[in-house]
Image (tube, rainbow, N blue to C red):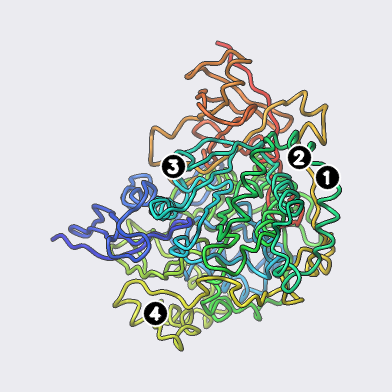
Amino acid sequence: MKQVFKSSCPLNCWDSCGFEVTVEDGKVTKVEGDKEHPITQGKICGRGRMLEAKTNSPERLTTPLKKVNGRFIEISWEQALDEVAGKMREIKKIHGPTAILHSHDYANNGLLINLDKRFFHCFGGVTELVGSICWGSGIEAQTWDFGSSFSHAPDDIFHSKHVVIWGRNVARTNMHLFHYLQEAKKRGASITVIDPIFNATAKIADRYLSIKPGMDGLAAIGVMKYLIAENKQDQTFIDHHTIGYHDLLALLDSIKMDDILAQAEMTFDDIKYLASLYADGPTSTYIGLGMQRYANGGNTIRLIDALVAVSGNIGIPGGGANFGNLQVGRSFHMDGLTLPHKKAASRQFPMMNQAEAILSAKNPEIKMIFVTCGNPLAQVPNSSKVKQAFKSVETLVVVDHFLTDTAELADYVLPTTTVFEEEDIYYSSMYHHFVNYGEKLVEPPGEAKSDLWIWTQLAERLGFGEAFHMSRTEFLEIGLSDLNKHGITLERLKKEKRLPLPVQHVPWETKEFLTPTGKFEFTSSLAEVKGYEGKPVYFPPKESSITNSSLARKYPYQLLSIHPSRSNHSQHYILIKALQMVKIEISEDIASEKQIEDGDSVTIYNDRGRLSGIAKIMKQAHPRTINVDEGQWHKFGGSVNLLTSDGLSDNGLGSVLYDCLVNIEKSIG
């Protein structure tokens, strides 16, 4: 019997798409877009469609695994849970709970994914990760400027006279914004794309501006200098709703326009053109993730925010500095789900350099790592150090669907369910404001169990089982409890499948900000409280010819690592044979200089590592630029993170993945 169900995409993505899932004889056979979804309107990407293959993959883990004498053997759940709980109990007794590290990422969405925090809080608190490899610098930057990171509703773009897509390839990573862009252009809006790589989004733009990687903040300074010189700033907004403008002016005065143009490798006409857009608003700015993955990443986002503020494009329909949309996730009663007050002890490591923190940890040392929602051996910077760190601990436990690079190192691997094998609620804190419901559609294969089941069983063994003596329905109701006053209940969500959350469609329209001063802060008081420079500053990337000329001579090319088009981070490489090779994309000038042709075997390298793959020449990219898509497994050739640095961004909460210089050579033989 064939049935079609409404569901939702769980992948960590901007779009959080609505699905129509076909189930035949207890098996998912097709995943398509839900045409009735208000935002995604039946359009889904290949990554979403791959969830059928993921659910049905013969590579799925279906039984708990234990490593004995270097080889995995299948064991029962009872044995796996008893042994893992026993090790946790012993470590807590001897060393304290923070001798256990919970290493997590954001591979999948889902309200009840957050119950891992409930488990570790009730355990007494463990060493936790803070920040984000993906977007940590930008979120913290906008928190300093605005008090949080909020974005305009998708259809607000139709109020924009101009749209600037700054470092975000929405055709690859935010496909429904791409659809809105196309419609906005039909309605008369201009589209401008700023990016080191000419991409699919740039193809529909009225103008594409190439920029040297890592110099976006410098370009924003140039645009502000021109606006103010021409007296085209919004002085009313500046005078009444901002603080620290004099510090911004001092920064702008300290940098010459000629230096901006030379270092950003842009023209004065580029700067004038951008200034004309921002002065002729409403102009919306959609900010990508890549430019904040540098040592200067937080200040890059702050300077773009400042440009949007100076030009008066904040708090107006059709404007905005659109990066994250945290108001979506904050709609839920997270404290009720996670019980942070139960945490008796705490220690935090930055997600980006967790490996270094593991290796150097004292009082206590890390004795166990518990990995959920991630594949750190592929995704965390400086892979060689990550492997060293994860091999150094006494016990490594991984919860996953597949035997990933990280799982292969583990002592215990616990097989978990996919989206269609469990009930949950899905949303995205990146783009739109609709919450989606997904019911359980099929049974999981073999003995795979949900994360909630695993936490419940471990909690029983560790003495706090009462914290999990609730049904999945009851947990979902707790998460939605803050929304009941708005008419959003689990019963209604189950019936209607998706509902709009009560968020601001035009953030900051009242000009009331969530900063300590209640104003937009060019000079951040929160930054100063945290021990950082609150004034707006600019400095170039850490690995560049400006800051380290000898390194740049040795490694003259900039390495980027953008999101793959067919895999959500590292998740789908095991499912797609064509992805199981390393593709090294190079700009045309590098190909000419090194006499490299499409299909040549090449190796990129720096002091941190080497990576070999097949060359592909990018037809239009900023000179001296190389890209390798992130997410590749080491067993399929190696991750780009063999070459990336595990350093921290300027505000301490982001990665410096893109702050990476390399050289390239044709492989011999």
Q: Nearer the viewer, residue 102 or 154?
A: 154
Residue picked out by circle 3: 204
User: Mark 2 to mark 1: distance in Å?
Assistant: 7 Å
Of the residues tagged 2 and 4, which is closer to the observer? Answer: 2
User: Mark 1 to mark 3: distance in Å?
Assistant: 33 Å
Q: Position of residue 25 (x, y in %)?
A: 18, 58
Of the residues tagged 4 and 3, which is closer to the observer? Answer: 3
Residue at the bottom extreme? 485
Q: Are marks 2 and 1 in contact (CB under 8 Å)?
A: yes
Left or right: 191 as drawn, with respect to 303: left
Mark yes or no: residue 100 visible: no
Going by the numbered disc 3, the residue's amino acid type is Ile
Q: Secondary structure at mark 2?
A: helix
Graded by Cα atoms within 10 Å as few (under 14), some (14 to 19) or many (20 or more), the crowding at tag 1 reads: some
Going by the numbered disc 1, the residue's amino acid type is Ile
The circle drawn on residue 605 is: none
Residue picked out by circle 4: 473
Residue at the front extreme? 230
Graded by Cα atoms within 10 Å as few (under 14), some (14 to 19) or many (20 or more), the crowding at tag 3 reads: some
User: Mark 2 to mark 4: distance in Å?
Assistant: 56 Å
Q: Secondary structure at mark 1?
A: loop
The circle drawn on residue 260 is: 2
The quadrant of the rendering that contains the C terminus is: top right
Q: Above or below — where is 490 with respect to 91?
A: below
